[in-house]
Every structure is written in structure tokens, then in C-alpha cells.
Amino acid sequence: MSSPTEAIREQLMANNPEFQRLREEHIRYSQRLDELSTKNHLSEQEQLEEIQLKKMKLRVKDEMEMMVQQASSV
């Protein structure tokens, strides 16, 4: 059985295009970070990209969590 928070996330994924867009972004950032993590050595550009991706991924996660919190307070 899913938690109330998980149920809210599922509802947002099903009904909220903005939440869906953010989730897709989060997945893309995660996939790219996974690609970078498989390399033995990162170039300077790749290191900068990795830092930027981590920041963007966190920002998107924070936005999704805010949406969950707002939906749970309604």
C-alpha cells in the first residue's frame, strides 16, 4: 500500500502536466549523470556539466516536492 505522499505524487503524475514535465527533466538529468559516472576520467567540461546537472536535478526535485506539499495541504 502506498503512503499518502506517494498517492499524491501518483495523482500529480497522472493529472498535472507541469509535474510530468519536471519528472521527465529529473529522469533526463539522472540518466546523463549515470553516463558521466561510468567514465574513468571526466574532462573539465564534463566536470562542470556534472556539477550543473546535480544542481538542476536538485532544483527540479525541490519543485516537485513543493507541488506535493501544496497538494497535500489542500
Image (cartoon, rainbow, N blue to C red):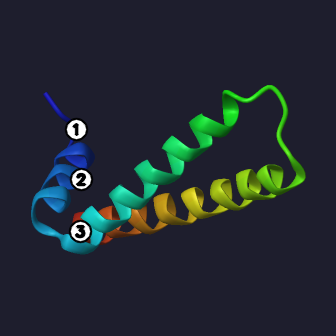
Indicate which disc residue 71 carries: 3
Given residues 61 and 47, the one toward you in this image is: 47
Labels 1 and 3: the sequence-earlier one? 1
Question: Is 24 situated left or right of 73 in this image?
Answer: right
Image location of residue 73, percent across then percent down: 26, 69
The dot on residue 19 is none
Q: Residue visible at 73% across and 29% down?
A: 39
- Examine the image and state in which quarter residue 71 appears: bottom left
Q: Tell me the distance, in whole angstroms, between the alpha carbons under discs 1 and 3.
A: 14 Å
Q: Is residue 36 above or below residue 49?
A: above
Q: Does dot 3 land on a helix, a strand or a loop?
A: helix
The residue at the point 16 percent across, 47 percent down is 7
Q: CA distance from mark 3 to mark 2?
A: 9 Å
- Within 10 angstroms of label 1, few (less than 14), some, or many (20 or more) residues? few
Q: Nearer the viewer, mark 2 or mark 1?
A: 2
Does residue 4 show up? yes
- Quadrant containing the N terminus in the rendered view: top left
Q: Amino acid at mark 1?
A: Ser
Instruction: Measure the C-alpha gap from mark 2 to mark 1.
Output: 10 Å
Q: Check contact, mark 3 vs mark 2: CB within 8 A.
A: no
Question: Residue beneath label 2, please?
Answer: 9
Amino acid type, mark 3: Ala
* Residue 58 shown left or right of residue 3 in the figure: right
Does any portion of residue 74 appear in the rendered image? Answer: no
Residue plotted at (48% across, 64% down): 60
The residue to which callout 1 is attached is: 3
Element marked by disc 1 = loop
Name the spot of residue 3 as percent of width and height, x first: 22, 38
- Label 3 vs 2, first from the N-terminus: 2
Q: Position of residue 2 (x, y in %)?
A: 18, 34
